[in-house]
């Protein structure tokens, strides 16, 4: 299993952060979260994943109940019986009687084995549904993060380009002021920088 899957925990704050991470990666980036942190947080708190975890817990409980069907059942009961003896000098009395029984299912026509097999299959289905949901949500997060990172890098490249063109504009302005460069050069760089 992936390492970020094992880092699951719960909490309202973590859910809100995970929601913000998926809807607005810039805020998560500025908060200092890396992609590993975002994956662990999302897997731990995303509602679909939480629902799948609860379904897995339910399936595992059904599996435990199916296993317990193979164990013997102990029952214990007590009662008071009215007993009358004639001739021995004992009259009507309430004498206690206790009864303990142990029943072991030996043959149920395959019912227990089939129930166990069904519970085991249900547990496997729930486990793989959880993993599938975790991977789907992780892919969604990574895709969103990549789209944001692409846009972030594009903005950075454009800002660097504008800075280079502004330096070029200052250089051409100095050359124009000294009479070495023509005004057309300054106008061309001004179109690119918007000045």
Image (cartoon, rainbow, N blue to C red):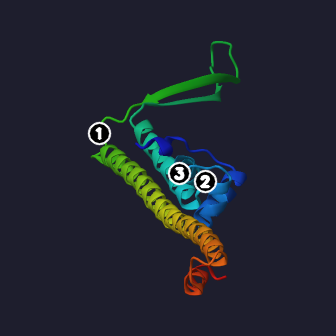
Sequence order check: which comes first, mark 1 or mark 2?
Answer: 2
Q: Which mark is residue 107?
A: 1
Q: Which mark is residue 45?
A: 2
Name the quadrant of the N terminus.
top left
Q: Is residue 150 above or below residue 98?
A: below
Label 3 near label 1: C-beta < 8 Å? Answer: no
The residue shown at (48%, 50%) is 56
- Of residues 76 and 46, the one drawn nearer to the viewer in this rendering: 46
Where in the figure is residue 173, as x and y percent of width and height?
A: 65, 75
- To which quarter of the image does residue 80 belong? top right
Residue at the limit of the structure toward the top, as seen here: 88
CA distance separating discs 1 and 3: 55 Å
Q: Secondary structure at mark 1?
A: loop
The residue shown at (57%, 67%) is 164
The residue shown at (61%, 44%) is 9
- Of residues 136 and 52, the one drawn nearer to the viewer in this rendering: 136
Sequence order check: which comes first, mark 2 or mark 3?
Answer: 3
Q: Nearer the viewer, mark 1 or mark 2?
A: 2
Which residue carries the number 3 mark?
35
Where in the figure is residue 85, as x and y percent of width and height?
A: 62, 20
Residue neighbourhood size for the residue with mark 3, other residues' Cα within 10 Å, grouped as few (<14), some (14–19), many (≥20): some
Name the quadrant of the C terminus.
bottom right
Where in the figure is residue 170, as x and y percent of width and height?
A: 64, 71
CA distance separating discs 1 and 2: 45 Å
Where in the figure is residue 36, as x and y percent of width and height?
A: 52, 47
């Amino acid at each position: 299993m992936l390492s970020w899957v094992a880092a699951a925990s719960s909490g309202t704050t973590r859910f809100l952060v995970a929601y913000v991470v998926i809807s607005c990666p810039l805020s998560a980036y500025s908060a200092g979260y890396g992609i590993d942190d975002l994956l662990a947080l999302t897997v731990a708190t995303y509602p679909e994943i939480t629902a799948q975890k609860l379904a897995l817990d339910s399936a595992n409980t059904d599996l435990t109940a199916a296993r317990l069907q193979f164990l013997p059942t102990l029952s214990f009961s007590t009662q008071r019986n009215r007993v009358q003896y004639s001739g021995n000098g004992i009259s009507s009395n309430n004498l206690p009687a206790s009864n303990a029984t142990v029943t072991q299912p030996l043959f149920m026509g395959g019912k227990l084995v089939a129930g166990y097999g069904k519970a085991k299959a249900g547990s496997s289905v729930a486990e793989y549904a959880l993993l599938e949901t975790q991977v789907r949500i992780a892919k969604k997060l990574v895709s969103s993060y990549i789209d944001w990172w692409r846009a972030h890098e594009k903005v950075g490249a454009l800002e660097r380009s504008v800075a280079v063109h502004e330096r070029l504009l200052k250089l051409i302005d100095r050359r124009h002021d000294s009479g070495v460069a023509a005004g057309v050069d300054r106008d061309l760089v001004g179109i690119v920088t918007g000045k």
